[in-house]
Image (cartoon, rainbow, N blue to C red):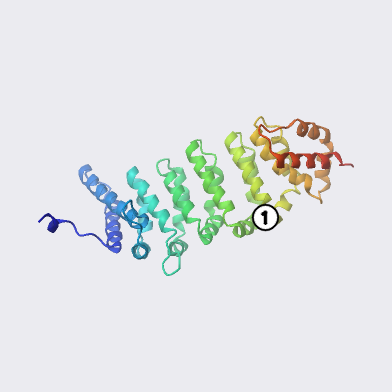
Amino acid sequence: MKALFKPKTRTPTELVRHTRDLLIFIDGNSNLRESKREEKMAELSKAIRELKYVLYGNSEAEPVPDACAQLTQEFFRENTLRLIITCLPKLNLEVRKDATQVIANLQRQQVHSRFIASDYLEENKDLLDILISGYENMDIALHYGAMLRECIRHQCIARSVLESESMKKFFDYLQIPNFDISSDVFVTFRELMTRHKSTVAEYLCKNYDWFFTEYNEKLISSTNYVTVRQAIKLLGEMLLDRSNSPVMIRYVNSKDNLILPMNLLRHESKSIQKEAFHVFKLFVANENKPAEIGTILMTNKNKLLRLLGEFKLEKEDVQFDADKTQVMKEIAELSL
């Protein structure tokens, strides 16, 4: 007889609608008494966990493609994504974690060979601004950061973030005193600047002046060790990427840019010294050095040769040693 009273299993479509109804209720009833709020939150937690099971499967079963497609279609038919993002601060920690995983998975679901999450975000770009601004709220920063990284897997969405006014906020968020949050910001920023190479190359060419002014002044010149280490390493990666060749050529033709890695070659941290060297060597290798850069290198020739000669890594690195030998050779051969 007990089987007769078992709750009916909801279809993926019904499950999304049920979740949406609960989110709308919680969002629109901020003055709920505590017991009612806990009841609805428990119901929502169960619903989002069931969404996760449909998308990820569980220990007993793999996800079913048709069920995933139905769930994904319904999720983006109405504003369920918007509701989850805007309601996230009102949810408890476990629900936030599950919701973040659901959003992450939905970015990878295809319906009729299309990533419909990408289509939805293209039409609702303000959600990207909300996710980025989430770094200002310590409680939800890491959840919003994880969601944002999944969204920028789509090249068109990464382009939208790069071209948005919110892009400028990253340079301030990277300096947030909370280590966990600033580290998460950097993971997102690095993903944004390295994943979609052609988009990034186009963006850097168009926004060279403001981007590298901010980068040099706020990151490379920071007094925070972690910020400097991460920033100089990422700078080297970006400049050495073949897609960014025009940007690299422009960067190494500036004497102001040269001074930064030269100063960091004297940093107390071996890690920072090593990453600074990888940027510095690009200036030395430039066959068409502007006269002012040649003059700076010539003026500091003996100091640079002594500094590089004494610079040894803790672990042997054959490639680094070969690069250093070549750079020292080119500096030694400089003449007026």
**Residue 125 placement (x, y as % from top left):** 47, 59
Report the residue that reaches farthest toward the right.
336
Residue drawn at x 30%, y 54% as measured from the top left = 50
* Observer-nearest of 260 and 136: 260
**Left or right: residue 253 compared with residue 140:** right
Residue drawn at x 57%, y 36% as measured from the top left = 226
**Residue 188 placement (x, y as % from top left):** 52, 48
* Observer-nearest of 195 and 325: 325
Q: Residues within 10 Å of mark 1 (few under 14, many from 20)?
A: some
Report the residue that reaches farthest toward the front.
60
Residue drawn at x 59%, y 41% as measured from the top left = 230
Q: Is residue 256 at all visible to an observer of this figure?
A: no
Report the residue that reaches farthest toward the bottom.
112
Residue where numbered disc 1 is placed:
244
**Left or right: residue 5 compared with residue 335:** left
**Left or right: residue 31 compared with residue 167:** left
**Residue 149 placement (x, y as % from top left):** 49, 51
Q: Quadrant of the C terminus?
A: top right
**In the rendered image, the vertical position of residue 197 relative to residue 308, given as above or below:** below
Q: Quadrant of the N terminus?
A: bottom left
Residue drawn at x 57%, y 57% as measured from the top left = 196
* Helix, strand or loop under label 1: helix
**Residue 80 placement (x, y as % from top left):** 35, 59
Q: Quadrant of residue 258?
A: top right
Report the residue that reaches farthest toward the left.
1
- Inspect the image, locate mark 1, and give the three-letter code of the amino acid beneath it: Asn
